[in-house]
Amino acid sequence: MCSTIKTGTKTYMSLYPEGSTDGGLRLGNIVPDFSMDTTHGRFDSFHEWKKGKWAILFSHPADFTPVCTTEIGRLALKYDELEKMDCLVATLSVDPVKSHTEWLNDVVAHCENKIEIKFPIIGDADRSISTAYGMIDPGTSDEQSLPLTIRAVFIINPENKLMLSLNYPACVGRNMDEIVRCVQALQLSYEKSIATPANWPNNHADILMPDGTRSTEFKGSVFLLPTVSAEEAKEHYPNFHTCDVPSKIEYLRLVKREDVENKGYNEFLEYVQS
Ligand code: BEZ
């Protein structure tokens, strides 16, 4: 029996279940909805708040702590770039909103008053959101001052599906460039049959060509997915380059980023699976 499947991150993610069977939150799941008290007021539904957009939900362990102070400041510096990518930002800790509001004066001052906090910070004082998203174990008691939320990042697509998550411990501050890079990679691969290599866009800066010369033309290029047939690759990406490897299997097929971005047609390539 034959069936067709589509490719691209959006389609790959649809192969995962929308709901988990054990209460855990995994990639591809629809993220739990919640009402939220924030530094920008109360919202009845996170899903409604982000409706139709990409969003980052970003947790920090505690207000008035050093690493968190730098993280919120650095995230604020990335806000305009993320907004241009149609990606909303909300952050969260188990501190009440009043604490967040007071703390933000320090955050802004520590960035020499050069930032504005344009995203809401959620006060998850009852830990219900942190528990639903697996940032805190549901077995921990309310009386404990610890555990605090881990440093988590959830990147959520316009259909409210979890596309990527990062978990860091309290002692390691996150790199905001990496978070923006992840959103860019997800959006680029969302409806295209491509995947981003390690260290993208700082990849394949100088590669060996079949004639023995070296080329810098493929710096920042991306890979065609294995689901793209040789015929489809030739038809849609005539300029792709296959890297030679000892196995002689032609799976390292590089496509320039501009060739992916400039494609005018809706590229939901299909392939036949038997
Ligand atoms: C910090 O942000 O510096 C921090 C927060 C909680 C525990 C440890 C460090």
Image (cartoon, rainbow, N blue to C red):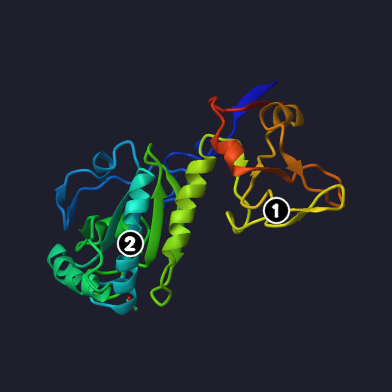
Q: Quadrant of the N terminus?
A: top right
Q: CA distance from mark 2 to mark 1?
A: 31 Å
In terms of sequence position, does the residue under pointer 2 or pointer 1 come before the other? 2
Residue 155: x %, y % from top left: 41, 50
Q: Is residue 86 above or below residue 271?
A: below
* Residue 158 appears in the picture as rendered: yes
In the drawing, what numbered circle is on residue 135? none
Q: Which residue is mark 1?
A: 216
Amino acid type, residue under disc 2 in the picture: Leu
From the viewer's perspective, is residue 30 above or below residue 135?
above
Secondary structure category for the residue under label 1: loop
**Can residue 147 be seen at all in this image of the molecule?**
no
Lateral position of residue 16 relative to residue 85, left or right: right
* Residue 217 relative to residue 112: left or right: right
What's the residue type where badge 1 is placed?
Thr
Q: Residues within 10 Å of mark 1 (few under 14, many from 20)?
A: few
Foreground pick, 98 / 131: 98
Q: Residue at x 87, y 52 (%)?
A: 212
Q: Nearer the viewer, residue 140 or 221?
A: 221
What percent of the width, then of the height, locates residue 195?
Answer: 60, 45
The residue nearer to you, when weighing 271 against 244, is 244
Residue occupying image coordinates x 76% and y 31%: 230
Side of 260 where 142 appears, left or right: left
Q: Check disc 2 and report the residue beneath it.
A: 77
Quarter of the displayed picture in which ligand 1 can be seen? bottom left
Label 1 near ligand 1 (CB < 8 Å): no
**Quarter of the image with the C terminus in it:** top right
